[in-house]
Image (cartoon, grey):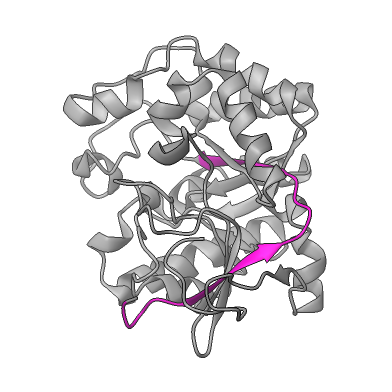
Amino acid sequence: MTPDAPRVARLGGRFGCALTVDVEEWYHTCLVPGYVNPADRPPLCQELDWLLPEFLGMLADAGCTATFFVLGEVAERMPRQVREIAEAGHEIGSHGYLHLRATDRSPRAFAADLRRAKALLEDLVGKPVLGFRAPEWSLRSLGNARLPLVAEAGFLYDSSLAPCAFSGRPTNPRFASRLNWRSRELLEFPPLTFGGVLRLPAGSWTGRLASPETLVLAALDHRDHGGLPVAVVHPWEVSGRPTPGRLTGLAWFVHETGRLGYAQRFRELLRTLPWESIADAACLHEQHANLAPPLQVLVDDATGSAGAPVSAI
């Protein structure tokens, strides 16, 4: 435990299966610094204007809802489409304003970005924005000093701490948890992994390479063990079209690996489980209205006390 790490307690309850969508353009990759900051970005083709309507139609056909973590920069350019997402029954969450790594920004700049994006989205949809996901999972670990700033900005939950190497830490919670600092609390809903001890992300290129059956079994196993499986997708992943711009090196590998045929595999995944938003899967709307989340806190077996410090749950 580092001085900034919270006390962690696993949440109990009967959860649904959550689908989450990171709403960003194909070029919002932190692996290409010249693309993510609008001040430095060259002219690039934008796809969300047609991708979002197609994606919403795909979800409607499958009878699914989702949490859309919308980038503030995108919301400012496409306010009508953000409202349409909310009006279709989906949850709006925040992906920050700029797609910059949290760890590359000072705590003060990160906090300002959090508040700017939250205020923009709440003004657009006319309701509280409860959830946040950091660009590129860049909060990384429980000990990141920027994590409590998410709670300070007024968010009820975070979904940024991947419980696997590289994108996160294997010591991050695998199950829905309550994070508690001395004066702040935050719920954490980590993304789903698969592959047993390997803990491969069920999203990104590893998830695109996996069969729908593999991901469904991982989600069901996670739920059977009392968890809330959180699937992750980007609209550009299911476009079924070539990327309209140039990526090279690691950025190309992460973006393109497994994308061929993934649109059909994703449709199969949608049809198999009753996907819904994080807010619905965890009944967060009612909890936020009561200002006192009643989710059950499970006792930590190692210490016999709820909310005791743990490195992995």
Viewer-proximal residue, 274 or 47? Answer: 274
> Residue drawn at (46%, 71%), measured in percent from left and top?
310
> Residue drawn at (36%, 18%), measured in percent from left and top?
243
Viewer-proximal residue, 228 or 305? Answer: 305
- Apparent side of residue 4 relative to residue 253 in the rendered image (left or right): right
- Apparent side of residue 62 relative to residue 206 in the rendered image (left or right): right
- Location of residue 257 (image quadrant): top left
> Residue drawn at (38%, 47%), measured in percent from left and top?
164
Q: Which residues are magenta?
A: 2-22
Residue 21 forms part of the magenta stretch: yes
Viewer-proximal residue, 206 or 55? Answer: 206
Of the 4 image quadrants, the one containing the N terminus is bottom left
Q: How many marks?
A: 0
> Residue drawn at (51%, 40%), measured in percent from left and top?
23
Q: Residue pushed farthest bottom?
A: 182
Vertical relation: 19 (above or below) 227: above
Vertical relation: 77 (above or below) 240: below
Residue 131 forms part of the magenta stretch: no
